[in-house]
């Protein structure tokens, strides 16, 4: 990936449930996600997808159209509660 101009990025494996609610993943993919866990009176979700983290990375700084395309690659692990043999993507 780096040979093709991509920056390899790494994102956390868990986030506050509000991230998944804001992105819409909680409503749309809830059946394929593991149950949330409570930590210090907050609900957390193990990540089923990487994209909400990448959106947070993008909006972390002011950008121009001249910065595009931004080439990020993540060889990250995602955790999904899917039936055996289910195709995901």
Image (cartoon, rainbow, N blue to C red):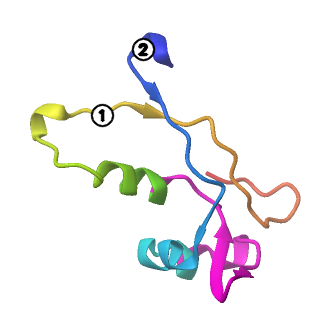
User: Can you name the residue that lies furthest to the right here?
Assistant: 84
Q: List x then y, in percent, for residue 3.
A: 46, 10
Q: Is residue 19 left or right of residue 47?
A: left
Q: Earlier in the sequence, mark 2 or mark 1?
A: 2
Is residue 12 shown left or right of residue 18? right
* Left or right for 76, reference 55: right
Where is residue 78 shown, x and y percent of the image?
68, 52
Q: Is residue 63 above or below residue 72?
A: below
Residue on which disc 2 sits: 4
Against 16, residue 61 (above or below) is above
Q: Residue at x 56, y 40 (%)?
A: 10
Q: Residue at x 73, y 58 (%)?
A: 79
Question: 47 or 37, which is in the foreground?
Answer: 37
**Tag 1's secondary structure?**
loop
Q: Residue 46 in the image: x percent, y percent?
A: 69, 65
Q: Residues within 10 Å of mark 2 (few under 14, many from 20)?
A: few
Which region of the structure is painted magenta? 28-51
Q: Between residues 35 and 61, which one lies in front from this camera angle?
A: 61
Tell which of 35 and 37 is nearer to you: 37
Label at residue 70? 1
Is 38 contained in the magenta span?
A: yes
Q: Residue at x 50, y 36 (%)?
A: 9
Few, some or many residues within 10 Å of mark 1 (<14, 14–19, 20+): few
Q: Position of residue 43 (x, y in %)?
A: 64, 83
The reply, left or right, for residue 55 in relation to residue 63 is: right
Which residue is situated farthest in the bottom direction here? 41
The residue that appears at 38% across and 57% down in the rendered structure is 56
């Amino acid at each position: 990936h780096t040979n093709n101009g991509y920056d390899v990025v790494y994102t956390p494996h868990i986030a506050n449930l509000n991230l998944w609610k804001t992105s819409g993943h909680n409503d749309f993919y809830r059946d394929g996600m593991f149950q949330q866990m409570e930590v210090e009176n907050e609900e957390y979700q193990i990540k089923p997808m990487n994209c909400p983290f990448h959106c947070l990375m993008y909006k972390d700084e002011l950008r121009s159209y001249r910065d595009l395309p931004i080439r990020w690659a993540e060889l990250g692990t995602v955790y999904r509660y899917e039936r055996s043999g289910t195709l995901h993507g």
